[in-house]
Amino acid sequence: MFHISDLKKFNRCPRIFLLDQITEPTPFRRMVRLDDEVTALAAEYLGAKDCFVGERGDDPAKSMRALQEHEWILKARFEYGGLRIKVPFLHHVEDGYDLYFLFVGLFPRADDMQFYCDTVWVLEHLQIPLKEIRIIHLNASYVREEELDLSRLFVTSSHFYNSKNHLSTSVRDAIYANMKDLSRQIAKMETAMSEPLPEAVRTGRCAGRQKCRHYERCFAQESELPCNSILTLTGTSERYAMSREGIQWLKDADPARIEGTPMQYAQIMADRCGGLYADRNALKSWFRDVTFPVSFIDFEWECFAIPPYRGMKPYDVLVFEYSLHTLQEDGTVDHKVFLSVHDDRRKFVEEMLKDVPETGTVFAYNADGAEKIRIRELAELFPEYRDQLLSINERMKDLQVPFVCGYVYDTRMKGVWTLKRIMSMMDEPGYHELDIQQGMDAVFQWRLLDREDKNADSEQIADELKAYCGMDSYATLVVFNWLRHLCDEQA
Ligand code: SF4
């Protein structure tokens, strides 16, 4: 018996499906916080009464009986042809059932139809007559007041949304137009279960937008690549073809087959120059407007699907920590850190405005994609501090720019521009010495503090969070010093 998730895996790559059968499952960790039992909230929104609520492991016959006995059927398990599904909501109406899907996002789109189609395929084969088919989703423009208003938090739509977030095709029409007979695919999956594991074949599904969790196992040799391997060349799938044809090193890359981005140029030049490439003129020019005191800042934040506090929208973020290193012209360095739980954004802002010097350049790594956005959000939330907050943004520079613009590349970066990777090249204490080593780990630990988890050692977690965020701002300072040093060196 299979689930829709198995079908999705098999469609992506039969090897993922089979590896998942034989490897220990990695515990599911939700990137976005979802404390509320969203099905219960949606049931309340729908006014569902006289409900049957299904449970994991239910016999599907129980759900079939519930159809006769209850007006609303929630989370019921059904099964047909070897495929087991969980249906969010069925509502008994005249001559049949209205089906409601639950999408815990803002704009359900018709580009990933499999869950919807496979669910309807099973229900159709069980001869459950479906009338309306709708999707309940979160309302992007809802702003929470003191209490959660379910009538405004959720939206019921009988249409998908297009890329401009406008209503487009009907949910029902799209499902019936895309629904496929699953019998043959289920049979193929059953056969695959008794066959040897297929060879790993690289496709766009291995490492596209979402890297396959089995990538390291399938392509173990890549973790041992020499720093200047052609396979570290970024932004081109031609690197694999060149490697197969015997081009092994960055310095030998065929210019006619690559896009020639600044990053690629820097990578190739680094290999030709013995491992390091630095466009010193470009670097000097980029650093020209830097003034002391120079600050290095890093934020940590949580993202909530359902707004927990007044003034928040679905999927809003809540900053909870900053670390700030400040470098004076005489070389002295000062460090401040702020960490809070629950909603302490006002204090966050007030402390930050006290700590960040009123003059001088402020650096953050990936500032344009993170800290600057968070500061703009805070300026909107606290208009009384707007000018001071936006003045920090005006003085803020993104230290990632010299790397992504190809001003500098060291082959030890192996095609990766993260602060952690660059820090690993420095002769400094690094992330590997910390208990928390990843941003999402920091968020998961903070959740324990925020939920006041009785099993968690809150003091230790707070120390670890301060150490991790502190390392981010410290690493930004170290990378800044390295780049300045490069500017001063003779080519
Ligand atoms: S890394 Fe590629 S070949 Fe390996 S399981 Fe994933 S998708 Fe399949």
Image: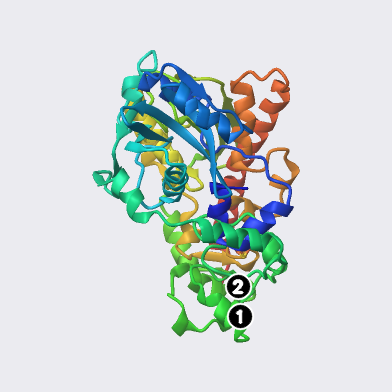
Q: CA distance from mark 1 to mark 2?
A: 7 Å
> Between residues 19 and 254, which one lies in front from this camera angle?
19
Left or right: residue 57 versus residue 180 is right
Residue tagged 2: 231
Q: Residue furthest top?
A: 146
Q: Residue 468 in the image: x percent, y percent? A: 65, 37
Q: Residue 134 in the image: x percent, y percent? A: 33, 36
Residue pictured at 48% horizontal, 42% vertical: 292
Residue pictured at 46% horizontal, 81% vertical: 257
Quadrant of picture, ligand 1: bottom right
Left or right: residue 96 versus residue 264 is left
Say the numbered circle drawn on residue 243.
1
Quarter-wise, where is residue 31 in the image?
top right
Q: Secondary structure at mark 2?
A: helix
- For label 2, count other residues whose C-alpha is less than 10 Å away and answer few (under 14), some (14-19) or many (20+): many
* First in residue order: circle 1 vs circle 2: 2
Residue pictured at 61% horizontal, 31% vertical: 58
Left or right: residue 317 versus residue 439 is left
Q: Is residue 354 visible?
A: no
Residue pictured at 33% horizontal, 54% vertical: 177
| Residue type of the residue flagged with mark 2 | Leu
